[in-house]
């Protein structure tokens, strides 16, 4: 079993790595931005329809990230099913997340109590922020979370985003693991800051890339 002192993403060096990658990606956005929005995808994966696309049919910006996992969907799904603050964590830069008060505890174990998400369940990113809501559950292939905080519910000031997970089996026993985000929002500066691409997208890329790599490791090794 991995001890807390050796969990990926934990410790000063991990936090420094995360901060450095975020800073680099913010600066490099004009040069890397378009490529970064489809990191790891193959062929038409970045534009293929995925469950949950219909929740934000005309996003102002979106991304799709992917990688190969040497495991079947059934071995990947448990790590996705338990994702969330107060649940299994986000398998990313835990120390960095907790520096901004997220109170994340990434696990390297499958937690039975969080293996059966249902439509309508709330999944928190931060203990004091409005939660995302589970909109689609299709084990072991799709989990879709959607967020539209009530603070932005007014017709003139609104925003909505999705966080989509998709696992596609391959004929060789491996899988493709994809995550997609889609955001739409009103023109106001508040919603632009909350749902707009900058600075959210570079930060999301760094954290999501780390998450995908860690889910890959967990699914392939079992811990």
Image (spheres, rainbow, N blue to C red):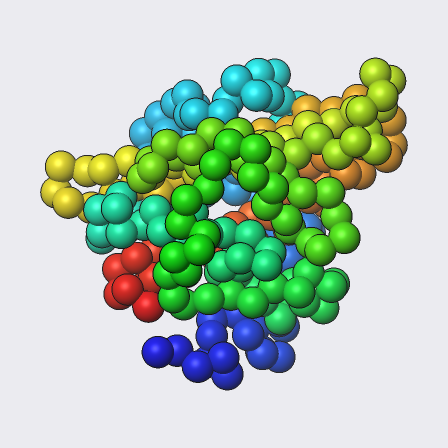
In the image shown, does 18 or 211 lie closer to the viewer?
211
Determine which quarter of the picture holds residue 139.
top left
Query: Residue at the front extreme?
Result: 113
In screen coordinates, is 199 left or right of 134?
A: right
Query: Residue at the left extreme?
Result: 172
Residue 46 in the image: state x and y as whole percent.
43, 29
Looking at the image, residue 73 lies above or below residue 5:
above
In percent of the image, x 39 and y 57: which residue is there?
Answer: 112
Can residue 29 be seen by looking at this rendering?
Answer: no
In the image shown, does 203 or 114 lie closer to the viewer?
114
Can residue 138 be seen by looking at this rendering?
Answer: yes
In percent of the image, x 38 and y 66: which residue is there?
Answer: 109
Looking at the image, residue 197 lies above or below residue 126:
above
Q: Which quadrant is the N terminus positioned in?
A: bottom left
Looking at the image, residue 160 lies above or below residue 89:
above
Q: Which quadrant is the C terminus positioned in?
A: bottom left
Q: How many marks?
A: 0
Residue 44 in the image: state x and y as whole percent.
35, 26
In percent of the image, x 67 and y 43: which residue is there?
Answer: 131
In percent of the image, x 72 and y 68: which residue is there?
Answer: 99
Residue 167 in the image: state x and y as whole percent.
33, 38
In screen coordinates, is 60 left or right of 105?
A: right
In screen coordinates, is 10 left or right of 69?
A: right
In screen coordinates, is 210 left or right of 141?
A: right
Residue 136 in the image: state x and y as whole percent.
47, 29
């Amino acid at each position: 079993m991995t001890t807390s002192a050796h969990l990926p993403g934990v410790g000063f060096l991990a936090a420094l790595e995360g901060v450095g990658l975020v800073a680099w990606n913010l600066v490099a956005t004009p040069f890397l931005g378009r490529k970064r929005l489809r990191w790891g995808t193959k062929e038409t994966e970045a534009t293929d329809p995925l469950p949950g696309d219909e929740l934000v049919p005309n996003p102002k910006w979106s991304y799709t990230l992917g990688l190969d996992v040497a495991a079947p969907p059934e071995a990947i799904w448990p790590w996705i099913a338990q994702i969330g603050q107060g649940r299994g964590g986000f398998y990313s830069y835990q120390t960095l997340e907790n520096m901004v008060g997220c109170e994340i505890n990434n696990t390297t174990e499958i937690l039975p109590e969080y293996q059966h998400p249902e439509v309508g369940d709330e999944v928190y990113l931060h203990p004091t922020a409005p939660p995302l809501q589970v909109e689609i559950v299709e084990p072991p292939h799709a989990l879709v979370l959607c967020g539209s905080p009530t603070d932005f519910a007014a017709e003139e000031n609104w925003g909505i985003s999705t966080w989509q997970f998709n696992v596609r089996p391959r004929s060789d026993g491996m899988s493709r693991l994809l995550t997609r985000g889609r955001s739409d929002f009103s023109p106001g500066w508040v919603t632009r800051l909350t749902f707009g691409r900058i600075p959210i997208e570079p930060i999301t890329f760094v954290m999501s890339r780390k998450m995908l790599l860690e889910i890959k490791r967990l699914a392939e090794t079992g811990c």
